[in-house]
């Protein structure tokens, strides 16, 4: 409550906080796990259509976005090191780079989706109905899973902005940075999910 | 119990891990671009599994954290694998 003078007997449980974010991450993994199983079953049922539909996705864009997310995962991980070394300036720069990379990812996604929509491909579009069930399922899953992932990116960005402000205000410090660590863990989760989305939608054709 | 000695991972380690992840990404793109059909799928998924293990171990600090996080993470992964295997026992023999 209120921005009081730091109480030395203030109740804080970093370990419980970390356990909490990990439990949340596990529910997210099971959630996406279910979607991956859905994908696998439909791919099994419509191998030919999935094969042809996957070829319409741009491997280059997918690869670029993979590289972007991997780098952003590294920068947010590095920001914790900087914080532990009491280097606030570097911490802020690294968090800033992470945010910037997240934004670039979303811009790429925007252009990718617009491209698909311009070609008449969106969930329930007349073209997909003509192409048949396999394509409808592939692109339905594509839009749903990459869309859900993009939503996670947006939530992660909001979280990281909050962290950035709190670091700047001196509320997250070298001896109290659990929020930064939790934000980092969430961001790595977003990266983890993409590590599987990328080969399943873009590479395996 | 809670050890105050937080492990500090060096910038260098993170940098090297990124390079490794990028190389693995490059390999998975290369392998799937040349026609290897069934094998390409298996290799791409194995590489994705390797990459995610590295992210979990180093970026997410599982390697340096208390054992309980590792145990829970492995349990969750095994649950997902079990459901996938069971699903395909069903679909594979229809």
Image: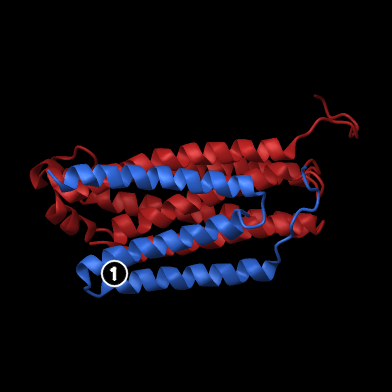
Q: Is residue A129 left or right of residue A66?
A: left
A83 or A21, nearer to the observer = A21
Quadrant in the picture for residue A100: bottom right
Horizontal and vertical percent position of residue A113: 32, 49
Q: Secondary structure at mark 1?
A: helix
Chain painted in red in the figure = A
Q: Is residue A46 left or right of residue A60?
A: left
Residue A141 at least partly seen: no
Please state the chain letter of the residue tagged with numbered disc 1 in the rendered image: B
Residue A172 at least partly seen: yes
Residue at 29% across, 69% down:
B32
Residue at 82% across, 25% down:
A2
Residue at 89% across, 34% down:
A6
Horizontal and vertical percent position of residue A68: 49, 61
Q: Is residue B47 left or right of residue A135?
A: right
Mark 1 crowdedness (10 Å alpha carbons): few <14, some 14-19, many ≥20: many
Horizontal and vertical percent position of residue A53: 19, 55
Chain B: drawing colour = blue
A152 or B91, nearer to the observer = B91
Quadrant in the picture for residue A150: top left
The residue pinned by badge 1 equals: B32
A63 to B93, vertically: above or below: below
Horizontal and vertical percent position of residue B59: 60, 57
């Amino acid at each position: 409550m209120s921005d009081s003078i730091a109480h030395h007997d203030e109740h804080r449980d970093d370990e419980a906080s970390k356990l909490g974010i990990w439990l949340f991450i596990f529910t997210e993994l099971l959630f996406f796990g279910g979607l991956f199983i859905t994908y696998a079953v439909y791919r099994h049922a419509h191998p030919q259509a999935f094969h042809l539909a996957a070829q319409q996705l741009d491997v280059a864009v997918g690869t670029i976005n993979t590289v972007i997310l991997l780098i952003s995962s590294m920068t947010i991980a590095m920001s914790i090191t900087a914080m532990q070394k009491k280097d606030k300036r570097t911490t802020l720069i690294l968090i800033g780079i992470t945010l910037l990379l997240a934004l670039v990812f979303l811009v790429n996604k925007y252009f990718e989706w617009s491209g698909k929509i311009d070609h008449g491909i969106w969930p329930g579009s007349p073209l997909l109905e003509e192409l048949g069930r396999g394509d409808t399922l592939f692109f339905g899953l594509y839009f749903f899973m990459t869309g859900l992932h993009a939503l996670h990116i947006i939530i992660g960005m909001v979280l990281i902005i909050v962290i950035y402000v709190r670091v700047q205000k001196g509320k997250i410090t070298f001896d109290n940075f659990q929020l930064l660590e939790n934000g980092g863990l969430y961001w790595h989760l977003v990266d983890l999910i993409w590590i599987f989305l990328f080969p399943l939608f873009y590479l395996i054709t | 119990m809670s050890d105050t000695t937080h492990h500090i991972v060096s910038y260098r380690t993170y940098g090297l891990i990124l390079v490794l992840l990028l190389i693995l990404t490059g390999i998975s793109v290369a392998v799937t671009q040349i026609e290897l059909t069934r094998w390409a799928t298996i290799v791409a998924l194995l590489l994705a599994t390797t990459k995610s293990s590295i992210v979990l171990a180093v970026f997410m600090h599982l390697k340096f954290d208390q054992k309980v996080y590792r145990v829970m993470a492995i349990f969750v992964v095994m649950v997902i694998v079990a459901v996938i295997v069971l699903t395909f026992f069903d679909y594979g023999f229809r």
